[in-house]
Protein backbone atom coordinates (compact mmCIF):
# COMPACT_ATOMS: atom_id res chain seq x y z
CA UNK A 1 0.00 0.00 0.00
CA UNK A 2 1.34 3.41 -0.97
CA UNK A 3 1.68 5.78 1.95
CA UNK A 4 3.31 9.01 2.95
CA UNK A 5 3.60 9.68 6.67
CA UNK A 6 4.55 13.09 7.99
CA UNK A 7 6.11 13.70 11.40
CA UNK A 8 7.95 16.40 13.29
CA UNK A 9 5.20 18.93 13.76
CA UNK A 10 4.37 20.50 17.09
CA UNK A 11 4.38 23.71 19.07
CA UNK A 12 7.25 26.13 18.57
CA UNK A 13 7.87 29.70 19.67
CA UNK A 14 8.14 32.51 17.13
CA UNK A 15 11.62 32.57 15.68
CA UNK A 16 12.08 28.89 16.35
CA UNK A 17 12.77 25.94 14.06
CA UNK A 18 11.26 22.58 13.24
CA UNK A 19 12.29 19.75 10.97
CA UNK A 20 9.48 17.87 9.30
CA UNK A 21 9.95 14.38 7.89
CA UNK A 22 7.97 12.58 5.22
CA UNK A 23 8.42 8.82 5.23
CA UNK A 24 7.46 7.11 1.99
CA UNK A 25 6.17 3.56 2.17
CA UNK A 26 5.25 1.14 -0.55
CA UNK A 27 6.86 2.72 -3.60
CA UNK A 28 10.22 3.76 -4.95
CA UNK A 29 10.83 7.28 -3.79
CA UNK A 30 13.49 7.87 -6.42
CA UNK A 31 10.85 7.89 -9.18
CA UNK A 32 8.87 10.74 -7.67
CA UNK A 33 8.97 14.47 -7.20
CA UNK A 34 8.02 15.24 -3.61
CA UNK A 35 6.46 18.45 -2.40
CA UNK A 36 5.53 20.08 0.88
CA UNK A 37 2.28 21.98 1.31
CA UNK A 38 0.43 23.62 4.16
CA UNK A 39 -3.11 24.64 4.91
CA UNK A 40 -3.86 27.18 7.60
CA UNK A 41 -7.30 27.42 9.19
CA UNK A 42 -9.71 29.12 6.84
CA UNK A 43 -7.16 29.39 4.05
CA UNK A 44 -6.44 27.56 0.83
CA UNK A 45 -3.68 25.02 0.61
CA UNK A 46 -0.32 26.56 -0.24
CA UNK A 47 2.52 24.87 -2.09
CA UNK A 48 5.76 25.55 -0.24
CA UNK A 49 8.54 23.55 -1.82
CA UNK A 50 9.34 20.56 -3.97
CA UNK A 51 12.40 18.52 -4.84
CA UNK A 52 13.34 16.49 -7.90
CA UNK A 53 14.49 12.87 -8.03
CA UNK A 54 18.07 13.37 -7.02
CA UNK A 55 17.68 16.77 -5.39
CA UNK A 56 19.23 18.57 -8.35
CA UNK A 57 16.18 20.81 -8.65
CA UNK A 58 14.39 22.48 -5.77
CA UNK A 59 11.62 25.05 -5.68
CA UNK A 60 10.55 27.37 -2.88
CA UNK A 61 7.56 29.66 -2.64
CA UNK A 62 8.46 33.28 -1.99
CA UNK A 63 6.83 33.05 1.43
CA UNK A 64 9.43 30.53 2.66
CA UNK A 65 12.46 31.18 0.47
CA UNK A 66 15.59 31.62 2.53
CA UNK A 67 14.00 30.16 5.67
CA UNK A 68 12.92 26.65 4.63
CA UNK A 69 15.13 23.93 3.16
CA UNK A 70 13.92 20.78 1.47
CA UNK A 71 16.08 17.69 1.19
CA UNK A 72 15.69 14.01 0.51
CA UNK A 73 17.39 10.74 1.36
CA UNK A 74 16.19 8.17 -1.16
CA UNK A 75 18.01 5.37 0.65
CA UNK A 76 15.98 6.14 3.77
CA UNK A 77 12.79 6.77 1.76
CA UNK A 78 12.42 10.12 3.48
CA UNK A 79 12.04 13.75 2.49
CA UNK A 80 12.67 16.55 4.96
CA UNK A 81 11.61 20.15 5.38
CA UNK A 82 13.81 22.22 7.65
CA UNK A 83 11.90 25.31 8.79
CA UNK A 84 13.66 28.23 10.43
CA UNK A 85 12.60 31.67 11.67
CA UNK A 86 9.03 30.51 12.06
CA UNK A 87 6.34 33.12 12.62
CA UNK A 88 2.72 32.73 13.78
CA UNK A 89 1.56 32.89 10.15
CA UNK A 90 3.22 29.51 9.65
CA UNK A 91 0.63 27.85 11.88
CA UNK A 92 -0.98 25.21 9.68
CA UNK A 93 -1.21 21.54 8.90
CA UNK A 94 1.77 20.55 6.79
CA UNK A 95 1.45 17.86 4.15
CA UNK A 96 3.87 16.05 1.92
CA UNK A 97 2.85 14.68 -1.44
CA UNK A 98 4.40 12.77 -4.30
CA UNK A 99 3.95 12.80 -8.06
CA UNK A 100 5.74 10.73 -10.74
CA UNK A 101 8.78 12.65 -11.91
CA UNK A 102 7.59 12.64 -15.53
CA UNK A 103 4.93 15.16 -14.56
CA UNK A 104 7.59 17.68 -13.69
CA UNK A 105 9.05 19.53 -10.76
CA UNK A 106 6.49 21.98 -9.48
CA UNK A 107 4.06 22.50 -6.63
CA UNK A 108 1.44 23.39 -9.24
CA UNK A 109 1.03 19.96 -10.83
CA UNK A 110 -1.59 17.53 -9.57
CA UNK A 111 0.10 15.39 -6.93
CA UNK A 112 -0.84 11.71 -6.85
CA UNK A 113 -0.22 10.66 -3.27
CA UNK A 114 -0.76 12.65 -0.09
CA UNK A 115 0.01 12.17 3.56
CA UNK A 116 -2.43 12.97 6.34
CA UNK A 117 -0.47 15.93 7.56
CA UNK A 118 1.31 17.05 10.70
CA UNK A 119 0.18 20.14 12.60
CA UNK A 120 2.53 23.01 13.31
CA UNK A 121 1.65 25.75 15.78
CA UNK A 122 3.84 28.82 16.16
CA UNK A 123 2.93 30.63 19.33
CA UNK A 124 4.45 32.10 22.44
Image (cartoon, helix red, strand yellow):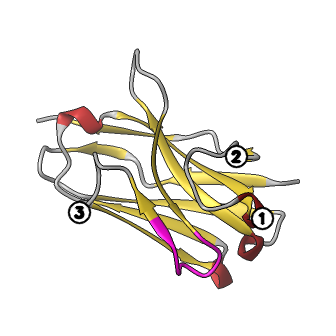
| Badge 3: residue crowd in 10 Å (few <14, some 14–19, many ≥20) | few
Mark 3 = which residue? 66
| Distance Cα–Cα, label 3 vs label 2 | 24 Å
Residue in the image at 53% along x and 81% along y? 56
- Residue annotated with mark 1: 102
Check disc 2 and report its element: helix, strand or loop. Answer: loop
Label 1 Cα neighbours within 10 Å, binned few <14 / some 14-19 / many ≥20: few
- Please say if 79 is above or below 18: below
The residue segment tinted magenta is 52-58
| Circle 3: element type | loop
The circle drawn on residue 123 is: none
Mark sitting earlier along the chain (3/1): 3
Residue 42 at x, y percent in the picture: 40, 15
* Residue positioned most to the top: 42
Confirm or deny contact between disc 1 and disc 2 (CB under 8 A). Answer: no
Q: Mark 2 — residue?
A: 111
Sequence-earlier tag: 3 or 2:
3
Q: Is residue 38 left or right of residue 33?
A: left
**Residue 39 placement (x, y as % from top left):** 45, 31
Callout 2 crowding tier (Cα within 10 Å): few <14, some 14–19, many ≥20: some
Query: Which residue occupies 83% across, 66% down?
Result: 27
**Element assignment for label 1:** helix
Amino acid sequence: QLQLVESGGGLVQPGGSLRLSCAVLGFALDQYTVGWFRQAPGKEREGLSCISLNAEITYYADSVKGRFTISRDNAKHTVYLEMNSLNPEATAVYYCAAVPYIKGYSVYVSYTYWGRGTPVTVSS
